[in-house]
Image (tube, helix red, strand yellow):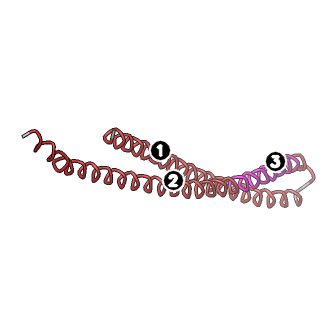
């Protein structure tokens, strides 16, 4: 029964270690997701900077077209439409950047919470393993005491038999 309890305790400890390993893998996956989100945010920021630069270029071109002859008004209208489209894209990129920043913050909070939970579970598991070792040691001491008590207990019977 003692061996079964010890084996059960070992299996429980191994199961807990497996769960802990799974949580560690999950944390690593979250770290990769955060890194990917940061890369995507940097790319979006770069696209936004490019779009803003393009908007500046288009504004300059639009200003020059306003000073040109009336015959170039058709080309100017096309450029204005292009400018509005770029401004719309810029607004979309800014919104996306804000969303990604919020997602990164959420992922960081989630990662921190999971890290705290994993640390707590690890501490709990370590305490359980320590308790199991203490119980196993106590059981072994009781078994040794019983083994050493057998000769003293059987001595009177042995004398009667002699």
Residue 133 located left or right of residue 21 = left
Disc 3/disc 1 C-alpha distance (Å): 51 Å
Report the residue at 47% width, 58% height from top: 123
Comes first in the chain, label 2 or label 1: 1
Labelled pair 2, 1 in contact (Cβ < 8 Å): yes
Residue 161 located left or right of residue 37 = left
Q: Secondary structure at mark 3?
A: helix
Residue 43 located left or right of residue 128 = right
> Viewer-proximal residue, 47 or 96?
96
Total count of labels = 3
Extent of the magenta region: 77-100
Q: Residues within 10 Å of mark 3 (few under 14, many from 20)?
A: few
Measured as percent of width and height from the top left, residue 70 is found at 93, 52
Report the residue at 55% width, 49% height from top: 30
- Give the labeled residue for mark 3: 85
Measured as percent of width and height from the top left, residue 82 is found at 81, 48
Q: Residues within 10 Å of mark 1 (few under 14, many from 20)?
A: some
Report the residue at 58% width, 55% height from top: 111
Which of the numbered marks, if any, corresponds to residue 19?
A: 1
């Amino acid at each position: 029964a003692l061996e079964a309890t010890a084996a059960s305790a070992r299996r429980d400890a191994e199961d807990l270690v497996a769960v802990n390993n799974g949580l560690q893998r999950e944390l690593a996956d979250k770290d990769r997701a955060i890194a990917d989100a940061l890369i995507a945010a940097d790319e979006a920021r770069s696209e936004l900077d490019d779009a803003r630069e393009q908007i500046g270029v288009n504004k300059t071109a639009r200003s020059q077209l306003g000073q040109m002859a009336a015959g170039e008004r058709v080309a100017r209208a096309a450029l204005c439409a292009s400018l509005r489209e770029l401004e719309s894209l810029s607004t979309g990129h800014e919104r996306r950047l804000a969303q990604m920043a919020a997602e990164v913050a959420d992922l960081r909070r989630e990662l921190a919470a999971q890290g705290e939970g994993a640390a707590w579970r690890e501490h709990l598991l370590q305490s359980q393993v320590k308790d199991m070792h203490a119980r196993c040691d106590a059981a072994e001491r009781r078994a040794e005491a019983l083994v050493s008590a057998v000769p003293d207990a059987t001595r009177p019977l042995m004398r009667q038999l002699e």
